[in-house]
Amino acid sequence: MRAAVHPYPLRRLTIGAIRRWELGDYQWRVNLGAVARPHYAYCVREACRLAALLGVPRISVVEFGVAGGGGLLALEYHACRWSKIFNIEVEVYGFDTGHGLPEPHDYRDLPFHWQAGFFEMDVEALRKRLSSATLVLGDVQDSVATFVKDHDPAPIGAVMHDMDLYTSTAAGLTLFDVDESRRMPRIFCYFDDIIGTDTAIFSDGTGERLAIAEFNRNHPHQEISPAYHLRCPALERWHFQVYVAHDFQHRRYNEFVSQPNQQLTLGSGMASGSSRR
């Protein structure tokens, strides 16, 4: 029924078939969104691309809120594929309590929608399926505080936020307070719980949206901003859930990474319909 009323029913069915049978090569499937968690694939790809352009040989990618582990396995898979394509070493980390959501603190954690113990992890079963990712278990506020000391991570290039609660997300965002040597100048982020349903009814004053807004208010030289280029045209829901964490004072933020030759000849704008002068 849902497929019949989807705004792009044929596209949805085609992408589903391509994903199921793994038709075509990996990069082509990613461009179509015909892979598991295409938003993860996108964020890791762009993190690797930026690392390659800046000559950074190793980066880290992180998932906050591992739960059953499907997302971390997907992140591990995409990290492996992009690592080979860009010749960039990619470390994968997954943060979780290991025993589900903590107790909501107040209205900001949406207790009408989330309860303590949701999304409990089978730690040993997940460990057996992981091939390279590192699980970082415990209260996120504590584990982020000791992350650099405990794991000596490569610069962080992409972060997937799926901890549901405002308090947990706010604690996870303190990862962007580590020394800039541990962070890329632009970090590609995915926020799972900023759209929701007609039961969750996420607002700017609760949950992940509030955590983002407070981070931006408290960090005048950093900004977590929507990836506007994905929103026009936006064919997938996740296009509205990808953000980029900018550090305007990062020593490498201003290094040129765009096309080296952007000169237009007279008439080229007319021929292409470009609005550039």
Image (cartoon, rainbow, N blue to C red):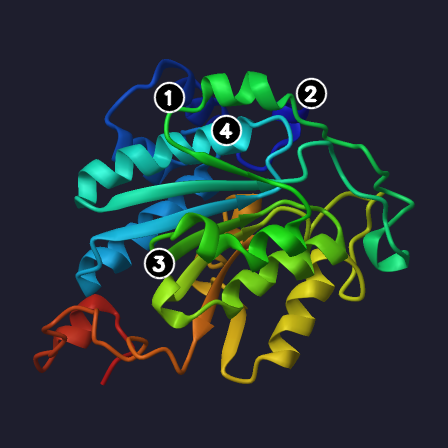
The residue under label 4 is which amino acid type?
Answer: Arg
What residue does disc 4 label? 12
Measured Cα–Cα span from mark 4 to mark 3? 36 Å
Q: Nearer the viewer, mark 3 or mark 1?
A: 3
Residue 76 placement, left or right of 140: left
What residue does disc 3 label? 155
Q: Is residue 11 something that shows in the picture?
A: no
Q: Secondary structure at mark 4?
A: helix
What residue does disc 1 label? 18
Estimate the x, y position of residue 268 in percent, counting from the top left. 13, 74
Q: Quadrant of residue 107?
A: bottom right
Which mark is on residue 181? none
Q: Is residue 221 something that shows in the picture?
A: yes
Q: Secondary structure at mark 1?
A: helix
Disc 2 vs disc 3: Cβ atoms closer than 8 Å? no
Estimate the x, y position of residue 67 in percent, counting from the top left. 64, 32
Q: Earlier in the sequence, mark 3 or mark 1?
A: 1
The residue under label 2 is which amino acid type?
Answer: Met
- Identify the residue shown where x is 44% and y is 71%: 246
What residue does disc 2 label? 1
Q: Quadrant of residue 186?
A: bottom left
Q: Nearer the viewer, mark 2 or mark 3?
A: 3
The residue under label 1 is which amino acid type?
Answer: Ile
